[in-house]
Amino acid sequence: MRWALVKVCLAVTAMVVVAFAVPLGLVIKEMARDRAFSNAEREAAVVVPALSITTDREQLERVVASAGSDDGMAVHIPAGDGRGAVDLGRQRAADADIAAVRKLGRASTAEVRGGSALLQPVALSLGTVVIEVFVPESAVSNGVATAWAVLAAVGAGLVVGSVAVADRLGVRMVQPAQRLVEGAHELGEGKLGARVPEEGPTELRLAAVAFNSMADQVVQLLANERELAADLSHRLRTPLTVLRLNAASLGDSPAADQTRTAVAQLEREVDTIIRTAREAKPQTAAAGPGAGCDAAEVVRERMAFWSALAEDEGRKVRTAGVDRPVRIPVARADLAAALDALLGNVFRHTPEGTAFAVDVHNGDDAVIVLVSDAGPGIPDPETAMARGRGSGAAGSTGLGLDIVRRLAESTGGDVRIGSSVLGGTEVRLWLQLDGREPVRRGHRGAMRRRRRAAAAG
C-alpha cells in the first residue's frame, strides 16, 4: 500500500509538472523573442527622424553610429533625383527580401546567418527606405535556458515533496495495518493478550476497535468453555465414585479387573480435563524433543483391553505391525484416546460377530495406523468426519473421529475414511514423523497389497 501510494503521487505530480512547466517554458521562449524584436524596432525608430530630414550618407552614418548599432543595422535608400541607391551598414538580408518589403510596405523578418533580420520600411518622398536591424540568436534566446532550469528545479522539488508527503502518509496508513496483522497472528498463535493500538486513519481505527472487541470476546468464550468443561467434568465424580465402589465389590476375575482398570483410567481422564480447563492459558506448545510414545505398545495395550468385549460378542480380532517398537511424536494418552474412539465406533456401529483389525505400518517419514472392519461401512465419510454431527444414534456425540483428526493434524498428517479389504470401513490414521505434509502418492496400493498378504497368511 505504501509504495502504491508513492507511485500514484509520483505519477500525478509528474503529469501536473509537465502540464504546467512545458507551456510556461514555451511562453517564456516566445516572450524572449518578442522582447528581442521589440528592441530591434526601437533601434530602427531612432533612424526614422533622421531619414525624414536628410539622406546624406555621412549624416546618416553618424546617426546610425549614435544609435549604437552600426554593425547590426543597415539602411537601404532607393535611387532617386538622378543618383543611385545608397546602402549604409552591413547587409545581411537577401535582396529579394528587401525588395519584397519595399514593395509591400510592411515590416517583416528574414532568417539570416546567426539569427534574424528585422526589415522596417519607411515611406519618404524619394521612395521607401528599408531599415534592416540584425537580431542575433543569443538575443532571441536570452534568459530562456535559465527559465527552463528554474522550471525544472521547481518541478523536481514538487515531485520530491509529493513523494515525501505520500511516503509519510503511506507510513501512517501502513503501520496500523501491519500492527493489525501482527495482532491477528499473535491471537492465532494462542497469545490471548494480543491487542492492537486504536490509532491511524478512521477505517483502521474502527478495524482495530473491532479486532480488540473480538479478542475480548474470544478470551471470554474460552474462559466460559473452560469453566463449563471443568463443571461438567466435576459432575462426573459422583457417578465415578459409585462405579468405583461397585467395581470393588465384583470380586476377583478378569472382567472385574478390567472394569476397575477402566474406572481408574476414567477418573484420571476426568482429573486431567479439570486441571486443563482450570489453567489460565491454553496449551499451545508443541511437544519437545524426545516426546512421544511407542505406537505398537499402545496398540497392543488397547487391543488387550477391547479383546475381552470382542470375545464376548464373538468378533474375530487381528493385529499386524506391532511386533517391534514404532516411535511417534504424540503423547501416549492422546494415541490411546484416538484408538479407543476408533475401536469404540467399531463396537457401537457394527453388529455383534463383525470382525475387525488394526494394522501399523512404519515408514521413513510417517506411521500409518489402519482400523478396518467387516461391517456395513459408512455411506457418507465426509459427514462422519464433521465435528459434532455423529450418527444420530443414542450415545453418539460425533467427537470421536474429530479427536482422531486433530491428533493426526497435530503431526502434519490426516485421517481418511474408505473401504477395507474386510468389506466394511477402513479408517486410516496418518501420523507424520517430521512435521511435513504427507506424501500420499502410491501408498494406498502398497498398503492394500500388504493387507491382502497378511490376510492370506
Image: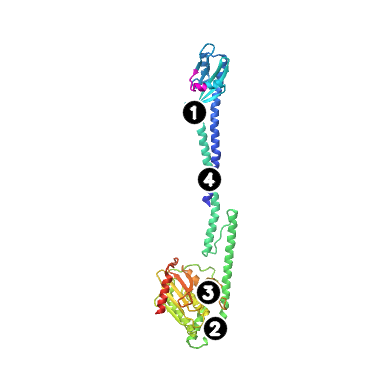
Report the residue marked by disc 2. 243
Residue found 49% across the figure and 28% down from its top: 137
- The mark that comes first in sequence, 4 or 1, is 4
| Percent position of residue 66, x then y | 52, 18
Cβ–Cβ under 8 Å for marks 4 and 3: no
- The mark that comes first in sequence, 2 or 1, is 1
Task: Please name the colour scheme applied to the rendered image.
Answer: rainbow
The mark closer to the camera, 4 or 2, is 4
Alpha carbons under labels 4 and 2: distance apart: 80 Å
- Secondary structure category for the residue under label 1: helix
| Percent position of residue 45, x then y | 56, 21
Tell me if I can see residue 326 in this picture: no
Kind of residue indicated by mark 1? Glu
Cβ–Cβ under 8 Å for marks 4 and 2: no
- The mark that comes first in sequence, 4 or 2, is 4
Kind of residue indicated by mark 4? Ala
Tell me if I can see residue 217 in this picture: yes
Can you say whether 286 is above or below 62 in the image?
A: below
| Percent position of residue 296, x then y | 42, 76
Report the residue marked by disc 1. 137
- The mark that comes first in sequence, 4 or 3, is 4
Quadrant position of residue 447: bottom left
Kind of residue indicated by mark 3? Pro
Residue found 54% across the figure and 18% down from its top: 129
